[in-house]
Amino acid sequence: MKTAGVSCHPWMMANNRGMRRLSFHPIRFGEIKQAQGLFCKVFGDQQIRRVDFLRDLDYVYNRENLRNCVAVTDRGRLVAHTAGRPAEVLLDGAVLKWASYGHVMARPEYRGCGVGTRMNRTVWGWLRKRGADGVFISGSRGLYLRMGAVTSGNYYRFRLETRKWKTVRPVRLGLSMRPGRLSDIADLVRLHRRERTGFIRKPVDFASLLRQRYSNLSYMTLWMIFERGRPVAYAALSAGKRPHFFDGIMDYAGSRAALFFAIPALMRRAGMRVGPITVSAGDDEFLLLLRSLRFKESWSPVIGVHVLLDPIRLISRLRPYFLNRLGSEVSQGLKFRGRGHAFEFSFGRERFRVRDLKSLTLLVMGDCPEKWDRALPGKGALGGILKRVFPIPFPIIGLNWI
């Protein structure tokens, strides 16, 4: 929320009496239009068309998810709002609970008075109780950073150029492609279920994109990729019609080889000769294919911030992932516990102290590789063990952005 040059309402400043008058509750269906109106006023300069929450954002504002969205009302009038969106993440044998978070907004006279902080605590508390281990926040404001969030992640961003595919001589794969349809939803969900790491998607995650060709405040087209008539991959591209937030390949799943060889044709159909793609550092096959063409490449954090809601539960849920990476004996010997506001990993007699939540987030989710390497123990077995499991190969946020 923007606060510069805005003073909160006088009644809010008097011993918090105004704050006590506010109601913080899960948004009701009848309040969605008020939230939409406030959104269009607060974020109007960021919209490429007037957003309709029920038409364009049904992956957030469906009846099942309304309990994760807070409405703040003053005598029945909606004055602030924010939204959460929980999901499950497949992670190389483990299943994590994660959530996206955004649309943090308030009327001007209610800014700078602690309403945003209380909204964050309220929704994060709901999400934690419902099992979320962490939250991705689409912004990076100081408000989130003061509450424990941190810019983190372990991704690589490539500048794709269609001309470089001319050097590739692939065997004919029988690939074909077309824009996605609502009838493809079952195949899209199935493709994600087969990912080694990725969000476990639901039909509602794709419905508005397929209907409207609009998602994440950007015009976007989802392309189905077929091999001899069988759906094997998809890619969502945002290009043309001046997309505001995203450009390039926004989201994908399925066969990386099929996707790799389909990319130049997809870009041409979208009117792109050059465009970006972000790839998780754990996506080894796709990274190898893209690096074979020597595209311009850079390490990248997530566009936003992460905050861990329950570190102890998160590490517990990562145990199947540790088992796959370390083997039975070593994974059982790796211990983790909280020590006040700090945390500690141990293996046998070795100890590694992590001083606070932000440091733990950077260790688990990823930081600039040079900084990250220096943060690990330089001697003993524990440093090598932690380097084999962290940063976790968290998938790209893609369509799970709010």
Image: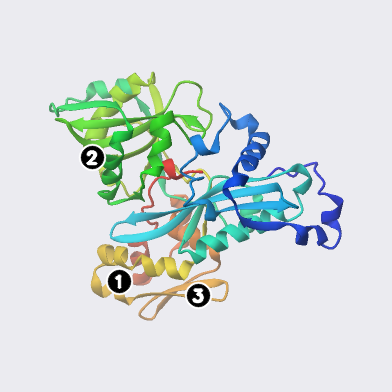
Check residue 255 in the rendering and tell me which mark sits there, or answer none. Answer: 2
The residue carrying mark 3 is 338
Disc 2 marks a residue whose amino acid type is Ser
Residue 140 percent across, percent down from the top left: 59, 47
Compared to residue 212, the image places residue 397 above or below, namely below
Q: Residue furthest front?
A: 30
Helix, strand or loop status at disc 2: loop
Q: Marks 1 and 3: CB-CB under 8 Å?
A: no
Q: Badge 2: few (under 14), some or many (20 or more) residues near its Cα, within 10 Å?
A: many
Residue 61 percent across, percent down from the top left: 51, 45
Helix, strand or loop status at disc 3: strand
In the rendered image, is residue 293 in sight? no
Mark-to-mark CA distance, 1 and 3: 18 Å
Q: Residue furthest bottom?
A: 349
The colour scheme of the drawn protein is: rainbow
The residue carrying mark 1 is 331
Check residue 39 in the rendering and tell me which mark sits there, or answer none. Answer: none
Residue 169 percent across, percent down from the top left: 17, 25
- Mark toward the start of the polypeptide (3 vs 2): 2
Disc 3 marks a residue whose amino acid type is Gly
